[in-house]
Amino acid sequence: MFPQNIDLHCHSNVSDGMLPPADLVARAAGQGVTVLALTDHDDVAGLAQARDAAKELGLCLINGVEVSVSWGTHTLHIVGLNIDPEHPALVAGLEAIRAGRSERAIRMAEQLTKAGIPNSLAGAYQHADNPNLIGRMHFARYLVAQGLVKDVRTVFKKYLVKGKPGYVSHQWADLADAVGWIRASGGQAVIAHPGRYQMGSSKMHELLEAFKAAGGEGIEVVTGSHTPEQYPHFANLAQKFGLLSSRGSDFHAPGEGYRDIGRLPPLPDMCTPIWQDWDCK
Ligand code: AMP
Ligand code: MN
Ligand code: MN
Ligand code: MN
């Protein structure tokens, strides 16, 4: 069995993190992480570099991705672990989501212009190291860099969440499709940070049923997006629905909110870890 510093959710500058994949892996190793999944939003382009760095540093790198999904009126994130980044269905699905991101960014910038913030499209792209993966975080960093808002958290609150001027609704992947691509590529699908979805308990149960029916296997219990009070709540739901439990920081950038990489408490004892049968080399 592994020592327990396992972090199965983080972002590099291939999506909306700030560190290049190799630097991210080095930071994880420095924090004592032994098993790391790189889970960039809707892109797997960082995995090869991360793997080279992990080999050098002697940590186990799990191929991951965090897929953006629309489920009814909700936007959800589904993490894929141990995926094959070259699987054609997964590659095509992620490519379609990225194309939607570019189109959404144009609409976001139009909305922000109307709200009195011009030029945000070019500005956001200046902050996107991977132009194919433009997202809200890049807009947020641009507004902060312009001195318009004090930090990214405040930008989201004032401009980028539902009901605010820079928010545009968007159709992401279908839940069953996303789980299907992950599974087709040999991976396990995990519901990311369930505590962040604004859902009552019956809606959450409905989601867990739909996710299981689609072939989903896991749920994040310990994540940088949950409060410690939420750990036992989601541990109970995992048990009730027969889901494996995952643990990940959702690290994006040094000093930018959430937990640092590899700095999370262990899963509650009642959980069955998603990594229980992994053969990590
Ligand atoms: P997108 O996929 O482009 O809609 O952006 C979603 C990303 O924005 C998440 O993965 C987080 O990195 C970030 N994010 C979402 N909500 C917030 C928030 N309230 N505060 C800070 N960052 C957020
Ligand atoms: Mn993100
Ligand atoms: Mn997420
Ligand atoms: Mn994430």
Image (spheres, rainbow, N blue to C red):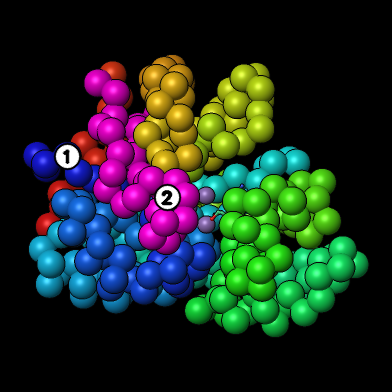
Q: Amino acid at mark 1?
A: Gln
User: What is the chief secondary structure element of the magenta stretch?
Assistant: loop
Instruction: Decide if residue 244 is on the left or right side of residue 70.
Output: left
Most foreground residue, 46 or 84: 46
| Magenta range | 242-269
**Residue 149 percent location from the top left of the image:** 68, 60
Instruction: Identify which residue is drawn at 82% across, 66% down.
Output: 112
Q: Earlier in the sequence, mark 1 or mark 2?
A: 1
- Return the residue at label 1: 4
**Residue 66 percent location from the top left of the image:** 48, 55
Q: Amino acid at mark 2?
A: Asp
Q: Vertical placement of 230 versus 64: above or below?
A: above
Q: Residues within 10 Å of mark 1 (few under 14, many from 20)?
A: some
Q: Vertical placement of 270 versus 97: above or below?
A: above
Instruction: Decide if residue 87 is on the left or right side of residue 261.
Output: right
- Return the residue at label 2: 250
For ligand 4, tell me if the residue under mark 2 lies within 8 Å: yes
Instruction: Identify which residue is drawn at 35% across, 38% down.
Output: 246
Instruction: Identify which residue is drawn at 56% across, 27% down.
Output: 209
Residue 190 visible to the viewer: no
Q: Is residue 161 magenta?
A: no
Instruction: Decide if residue 148 is on the left or right side of residue 134.
Output: right
Disc 1/disc 2 C-alpha distance (Å): 17 Å
Q: Quadrant of residue 235?
A: top left
Q: Is residue 248 magenta?
A: yes
